[in-house]
């Protein structure tokens, strides 16, 4: 829709809310951001929380799990969005891959020093970041350039914690989950963005487990629908996968993904592949094995053999529109694996300075606001 068409709509003298919520809300984000400059009235309407939520719920990604074409990347105190377009002509796909990195301009008003913030969650265009030294959680939408911070004194009591972030449709609320271990006890705390309050959760299903972060300073749970997943160690030495239902706030053990020959593999982690929970592990031969748990309980396997040299991979992010899957192939590199080629083919997308490791999370662009009194807004027109 061009500006001429916007002018035409305005001349029709339609009610403002009808234009905003029945017409503009169905347009792509890029167009909407441009239309904020039409007038101050449009700017404030298109910047409102109500419009952001309406736009997201009208988009196809609200009703089905979308292909992955965008991720958020943190490298030290630098933040990036990486996206690509596989709808372009085949000869232009490589150019789309090469030009997909965009650095975000944010300093959080200079409140925080370098390398003290870690991204630990992503949901519906909102990012959850942790500042452990100052005991702050930050919820940020880089598309609308707004963020909120929330204090949490208990952060100082534990440096190694697991985190999760997700949305509960039935109560229209975003929740933050923090898991820590104090002596022999696993502690679970949940923060509601709607009430802005913390509470502790008790679940006897965790009694036989201890929480180990595999030498990672901060472990992000894998979000699928409205459940967060982590790998936990059992007291007997084996491992289990637990899911935390954000709506009921209860844990359930997930069976079938950790095979009986798990002792033949080393490091393993969880990921989301096409909307399904997946576990990635490395065999002693140097192969990478991906197990995907389908709705009917069946397990689908993907094997990446050692000649692809992907033993350093540390995250997977699901399938693109063309059926390739996005993979963090090392602490510094992001790439795509094409399963349809023979042999399977790996394409490097972006590589960062090896002096700094990167943290990568799937990201779905949206206009949803962090929605707090402490939100930092875009400068006036």
Image (spheres, rainbow, N blue to C red):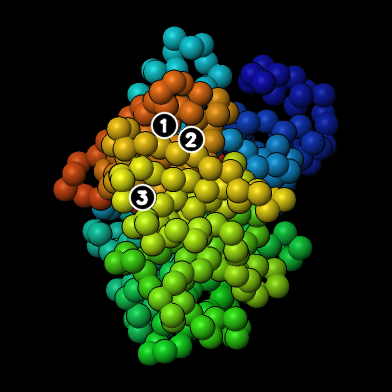
Residue at left offset 56%, top offset 75%: 190
Q: Position of residue 230 (x, y in %)?
A: 50, 65
Q: Earlier in the sequence, mark 3 or mark 2?
A: 3
Characterize the local packing of mark 3: few (<14), some (14-19) or many (20 or more) Cα atoms within 10 angstroms.
Answer: some
Say which of marks 3 and 2 sits in front: 3
The residue at which mark 1 appears reads as: 336
Q: Position of residue 70 (x, y in %)?
A: 48, 37
**Is residue 134 visible from the viewing direction of this image?**
no
Q: Secondary structure at mark 1?
A: strand
Above or below residue 267? Residue 132 is below
Q: Secondary structure at mark 3?
A: strand
The residue at which mark 3 appears reads as: 283
**Residue 19's mark?**
none
Residue at left offset 16%, top offset 48%: 355
Q: Secondary structure at mark 2?
A: strand
Query: Image check: 112 left or right of 227?
Result: left
Mark 2 and mark 1 residues within 8 Å of each other at the beta carbon: yes
Q: Nearer the viewer, residue 139 or 258?
A: 258
Characterize the local packing of mark 1: few (<14), some (14-19) or many (20 or more) Cα atoms within 10 angstroms.
Answer: many
Characterize the local packing of mark 2: few (<14), some (14-19) or many (20 or more) Cα atoms within 10 angstroms.
Answer: many
Q: Nearer the viewer, residue 169 or 259?
A: 259
The residue at which mark 2 appears reads as: 325
Q: Nearer the viewer, residue 327 or 49?
A: 327
């Amino acid at each position: 829709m061009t500006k001429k068409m916007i002018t035409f709509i305005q001349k029709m003298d339609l009610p403002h809310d009808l234009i905003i919520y029945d017409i503009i809300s169905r347009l792509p984000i890029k167009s909407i951001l441009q239309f904020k400059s039409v007038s101050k009235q449009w700017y404030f309407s298109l910047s409102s929380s109500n419009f952001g939520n309406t736009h997201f719920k009208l988009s196809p990604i609200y009703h089905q799990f979308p292909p992955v074409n965008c991720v958020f990347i943190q490298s030290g105190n630098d933040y990036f969005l990486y996206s690509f377009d596989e709808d372009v002509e085949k000869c232009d796909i490589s150019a789309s891959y090469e030009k997909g990195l965009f650095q975000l301009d944010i300093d959080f008003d200079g409140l925080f020093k370098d390398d003290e913030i870690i991204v630990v969650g992503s949901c519906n265009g909102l990012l959850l970041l942790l500042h452990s030294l100052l005991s702050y959680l930050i919820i940020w939408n880089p598309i609308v350039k707004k963020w909120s911070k929330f204090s949490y004194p208990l952060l100082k009591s534990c440096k190694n914690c697991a985190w999760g972030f997700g949305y509960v449709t039935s109560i229209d609320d975003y929740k933050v989950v923090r898991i820590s271990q104090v002596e022999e006890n696993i502690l679970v705390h949940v923060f509601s963005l709607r009430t802005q309050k913390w509470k502790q959760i008790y679940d006897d299903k965790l009694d036989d487990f201890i929480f180990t972060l595999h030498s990672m300073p901060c472990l992000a749970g894998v979000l699928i629908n409205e459940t967060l997943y982590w790998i936990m160690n059992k007291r007997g030495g084996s491992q289990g996968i637990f899911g935390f239902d954000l709506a009921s706030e209860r844990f359930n053990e997930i069976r079938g993904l950790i095979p009986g020959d798990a002792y033949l593999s080393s490091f393993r982690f969880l990921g989301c592949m096409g909307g399904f929970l997946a576990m990635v592990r490395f065999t002693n031969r140097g192969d990478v094995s991906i197990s995907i748990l389908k709705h009917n309980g069946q397990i689908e396997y993907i094997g990446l053999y050692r000649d692809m040299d992907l033993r350093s991979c540390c995250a997977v992010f699901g399938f693109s529109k063309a059926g390739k899957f996005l993979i963090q192939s090392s602490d510094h590199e992001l790439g795509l694996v094409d399963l349809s080629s023979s042999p399977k083919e790996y394409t490097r997308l972006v590589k960062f300075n090896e002096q700094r490791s990167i943290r990568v999370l799937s990201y779905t662009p949206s206009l949803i606001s962090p929605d707090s009194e402490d939100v930092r807004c875009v400068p006036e027109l």
